[in-house]
Structure formats: structure tokens, C-alpha cells
Image (cartoon, grey):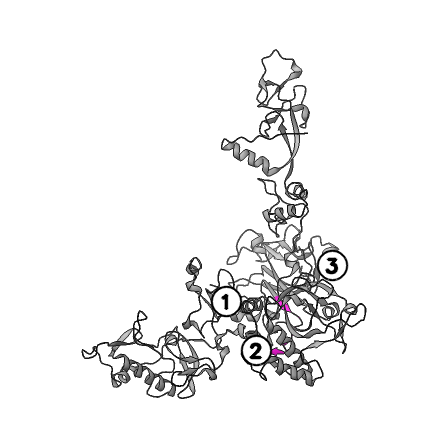
Amino acid sequence: TVVAEKINFWRFISHFRMVHRGSFFAQLKTTTVRKLLPESWGFLCPVHTPDGSPCGLLNHLAHKCKIATKSVDTKAIPGLISQLGVTEAPSASVEDSVVVMLDGRILGFCSPQQARVIGDTLRYWKVEGTHGVPAELEIGYIPNSNGGQYPGLYMFSQAARMYRPVKYLPLEKEDFVGPFEQPFMSIACTEPEIISGDSTHVEFDPTNILSILANQTPFSDFNQSPRNMYQCQMGKQTMGTPGTALKYRTDNKSYRLQTGQTPVVRPPLYNEYGLDNFPNGTNAVVAVISYTGYDMDDAMIINKSAHERGFGHGTVYKTKKIDLAEDNGGRRGRGGNVKKLFGFAPGGLVRAQWRATLDDDGLIAVGMKVKEGDIIAASHTVTKDPITGEYVNRDGITHLHKYKEHEEAFVEEIKMLGTDTGGDEPCQMLSIRLRIPRSPVIGDKFSSRHGQKGVCSQKWPAMDMPFSESGIQPDVIINPHAFPSRMTIGMFVESLAGKAGCLHGVAQDSTPFKFKDKAGETAVEYFGHQLKRAGFNYYGNEPMYSGITGQELGADIYMGVVYYQRLRHMVNDKFQVRTTGPVTALTGQPIKGRAKGGGIRVGEMERDSLIAHGTAFLLQDRLMNCSDYQKAWICRGCGSFLSAQPTVNQYGHRKGVNASNVRCRRCSTKATGSEPRSDTWEDGRGDKFVGGSDVTVVAVPGVLRYLDVELAAMGVKMKFDITP
């Protein structure tokens, strides 16, 4: 079972096209189950699958693939095949009789040559729509082979089958084929690939093999395959528009992009699926230039003025619930157990500071800004009067409910929720919808539609941004080094197409496999001529001027319009800070976990990096001082932590453990009674000892003492050398 998350609409529709092989296959060491096979062509998308452990196991249906939901009427089939020469028993005169089956039921036998003719004839009638052959019937002819599948003519008509449309060449009409018959058919990908006398079908469009999301990647045929896979994953993590009924939804957490736009460069499928109702990003003017040094390693510089105008501005909506029945420690039942009500206690004390944020009903006002520790609701205890049946408060005490999150938020909506039983009990649950504005900050993640992800490294003032001769300043600056190794040429083409589309006021078609490599039919020529007609450089380059000095830059800069997505990975959800906080009881080291105020582990690789950097003394700070620093008593003689023990003061009960009353039990000897009283010491059980005074205090990691104890339990002694 998968929860249909509505992070954005792309993720939502992907859930309903998802196909998983099952958790059993995820454990297999073999890669056979993950491979692309001929029968999956056009049924499962080769691009829309995750990278990593679920690769090839978690697939998505191609956008033209359909699932048969009901069985089709096949009562005419037995009569038709008997007319075509199928006999109920295999003929003795034919050496190699092959079986003819319908949904696993044997209808008869015939020769292999007859089986091919029968299959072709049934297919012709099927596409033609005559003789009662249903259009969704799957007709799989398997020829004789050496070690291949068992030969025969197999037909399938039941539900739960995949099928897809292709063009049947003899009739130039639509034919539905299934995954069983496809490997034994000759289907050409494009019209020029049709082989006369061999090809029986041709694809309607080469993009039919791709899923809905993979089809949204513009010019994906120009990109390296892994980049298209990354985009399919990142498109589902975008802060977009999760739905049109956002006002009425109460999801635990939802993301929304406030400034969504329709892309200038998009395939016709974008309109076919109505994705304009759910905008997923923003058209940005992008310059490819190494400027300021803040754009290294996939970082991107955002124009501060574009940011102030709302570029990438998003909102997070959270829903908090206050359940009075849970506060009682009990569960809501069928009447009679209401022990609390929302509101101020009648006749009780109501402070002015409570009134500042709460309305008369004891609930926070809509539109209020709340921060950690603010009061969001008030309640009071009640008992039911047996005579009047009313709920009465007897103690006059108002209980307060506070906002516990660290981040400031605005109250968007308040709902009082009744019981599931629909009785006339007072409402016991309060639902508060909070709105958290999230403007892009340094460290927030963005990506283009080509798997080119990056983080915002700086919001650069517009006055210092480079500008073109026409006065255009880029919204986003990315580093040229993002392209050579990744080979996302589709992003260059999108930049050209977006620029041309903006200048001419048209939406550009970005369907893959549309352009060819022949002269006069390339993407560069198509969009370059449009740019030239608008008075811009044929190749999309422009002379630009430094925003700092005003001088023309030494090289022309590639600048165009690219659709950028803001991803849901934000610094405000991920940053982790700790000075002091909770520690593990066993070792004294900080706990892990952002929610619990834990620390970040300095592991083996970080340790090696510090040593390699020549800052080895930092290890003492990271691994001891800031982790589990402890002061411990140790004996200089035997070098053990475990034998040092406090003594009982013979002259009084002064508190504190110091050098005068800590001794080593192992290095001491039992007192005989003849020793001076000042030289003897007593443990807590009344035994007296002499010696063992050579102890000192050392600073050690707490886990070292824990290790010493663990080894001692197994009979292994640790000895330490103590030097001043």
C-alpha cells in the first residue's frame, strides 16, 4: 500500500501509474529482474524509475499504456478458427502440430504455417472491427524456434492485461497489442524505419514509450539518460500546486508555490493532462557565467530583486490538532464522558495577556502570528449535572494549550471537529491550520527540468548583477562547469527555445525526437532563425556588462529563459544546531536526531580529514571536549580507573571527594593495626587499609571508562601510563 502524497500534482498522478515488482525481488543479488526487456517496450517507462536499490523494480506505466479492466466477448472465436482450419485433435498427417489456445483453454491444433495465417487473419478482422473479433483481444503467435518459447497461437481476452495502441499498416488504423505478442511482431519506431514486406505496425509517436512525467522533460533526447531519470524524481519533489481545493484541505503538511507559471517550453501533453491548473515552477532568465565565485559546485546566484518580486516564493501549510479526549487520558466514547470543553472557565481568572491572542471562545484569532510558547487555545474541566444535564465547571481554572514549534507561523483556519458518531456532544477536537511563509534563503534547493539541481548560494543585489545591451538582468546565474560532464544539452536547447518563445509570444513545442541531425532540421537552426528574426544572436549569446565596473565582459554570455523548479528540501527544515543538550546515559555522548536537539556525529572519515588537514588537535575538541569530557580518578601505580575508590573520613563527615580521601584499592594493603592512624584509611564496609595514595585526576572521554568496564567484565585488564 502506498499513500498518495499530494506534495504536488505530478507526484499524485505518478502514484496511480506506478508498478512495483515486490519486496522479494529487492533482496535478490541478480540484476536480471531489473533489466529492460523487449516485452516491456511501450508498457513500462525506461526513464521513470529511481536510481539506487529500487531501480528497475519500481516502474511506471508508459503514458499510452492501458489496463484491461474487464473481459471481452470471445464467443465468436472458436467458430472462426475452426473455419480457418483448426482441428480439435492434432492431425497425424502433420509432423509439427501447434496448439491454439484462448485464455489457457485448448481450442484445437494446426500446422505452424496455418497458425501464422490464422493469427494474421484474426488481427485483420480485429482492426477492421468485423466477424465479432474484439478490439482488445491479444493474439500472440509464437513460431518454432531452437530452445525458445513453446510454439503456438495464444489468445487472451481476460481482465488485468496491459495493452497499448500502435498503427496497423495494412489498414492504417489503430491496433491494440499486448506484452505477450509484442516480442514476436515487427513494429517500426518511426515511418522511415518501416521495412516493406516485414513491418506490420508502426508507432504512432516515439514518445509513447515514456511515462507522463518523462514526457514533460523538454528535449529529453538531447540529455544523458541518468539526468532524465533524476528529473523524474525531482519533478515529484517540487514545491508546486498540490490541488485546486487547498482552501478546504487539512493535510498534515502541504507545500505550495505562490508564484507558479506555465512553462514557455512544453510538450503538447502538458495541455492534454491539464497541468496548467497545477503550476510547478517559474520561468527564469538564466545566464551561464562564472560570476562572483559564489556559483561553484552547483550553487546558483539569485537576483535579489527577482527574489523580492516573488521568484520561488512558497508556503508550507501545517495542521495541528488539539484533542481534549486524549488530554483526559481516555478515548472518546458514545456520550457521557466529556470532561473538558474549549473556552475560558466561567467565573474564573482571565488574564489580559490571554485576551490579547484569544477570542471570547478561548480560541486563537484567525490571522494571528504565533511563535514558540504562544497560547493558541484555552480549555476548562467540566462535570455533567445529573439534574439539568448541562456541563458545569466547578474549579474556575483555565488550562492553556501552547504552540510548541520553533518556526513562526500565521493562523490560516480554525475548525471545531465533532464526534465520529454524530451525536449532540460538545466538540472535543480543535484543528488549527497554520501558514508558514518560505521565501528562498541561502541553501534552498532548486533544479531545472534536466536534472541540474543546485542550491541558492547568494541573493545578489540587482545593481551588481551583469546586464545585457537591452538592459536585461538574469534572475539566475549558474556555472558553466555544470554542463560538460553531465551533457544536459537539452537545457541549452530549452534556453534557446524559451528565449525565442518570449520574444515572439508563443509557447514552444519541446517534444523529444522532433528534430533530426540533418542540416536544416536541427533544433539550433529552428530556434536560431526565430532569435535572428527578433534581432538577437543566432546562437543565444549576448554581450554583457559587469554590474560592478560597468565594463563589457570579455566573452559573450549564453542567456535564455529556462523553467526552474523549487524543491521541497529547505534549510529551515534541515538545519541542526547544538551547544549543550541531552546526552546518552550509558556513554555520556550527545544523542543523535534533529528533533531531540542532538548533535552531528564526527565519524571516521571526518577524523581522517582533520588529520590530513594538519589540524589534529581539533580532534581533542571534537571527540572529547565537546562530546563526553569527564574527569576521572586513576592510580599512577597500577594504571587503572576501576581500582580508585573514595574513603570514609575518620575525622568527620565532610562532603566532597578530593585527593586526600581517594585511594587505590589494588595498590593498598590491609592494615594490621600497628600503623599510625594518619596512614590508614577505611572503605565503606569497615575494613582498614594502608597505602594506595598515588592517585591523580585525568581528563578522559567518558566512553573510555565505559570500555574499561566492559572489558573488565570479560576478564581483560586495561593499564594506562600516567605522565605529568
Asked whether the viewer can see residue 232, the reply is yes
265 part of magenta stretch: yes
From the image, state whether disc 1 or disc 2 is nearer to you.
Answer: 1
User: Image check: 418 left or right of 310?
Assistant: left
**Of residues 407 and 519, the one drawn nearer to the viewer in this rendering:** 519
Residue for badge 2: 270
Q: Give the spatial CA distance, label 1 vs label 3.
A: 53 Å
Q: Is residue 243 above or below residue 338?
A: below
Please tell me which of labels 1 and 2 falls first in the chain: 1
In the rendering, at what x and y percent does residue 684 appear? 59, 23
**Residue type (three-letter) at the residue carrying disc 2:** Tyr
Q: Give the spatial CA distance, label 2 vs label 3.
A: 49 Å
Q: Quadrant of residue 151?
A: bottom left
Q: Residue at x 25, y 86 (%)?
A: 83
Residue for badge 1: 49
Please tell me which of labels 1 and 3 falls first in the chain: 1
**Of residues 117 and 240, the one drawn nearer to the viewer in this rendering:** 117
SS at mark 3 in the image: helix
**Residue type (three-letter) at the residue carrying disc 3:** Ala
In the rendering, at what x and y percent does residue 567 appear? 62, 65
Q: Residue at x 65, y 21 (%)?
A: 649
563 part of magenta stretch: no
Sort mark 3 into few (<14), some (14-19) or many (20+) by Cα contacts within 10 Å: few
In the rendering, at what x and y percent does residue 715 appear? 50, 31
Q: Give the spatial CA distance, label 1 vs label 2.
A: 20 Å
**Of residues 411 and 683, the one drawn nearer to the viewer in this rendering:** 683
Asked whether the viewer can see residue 413, the reply is no
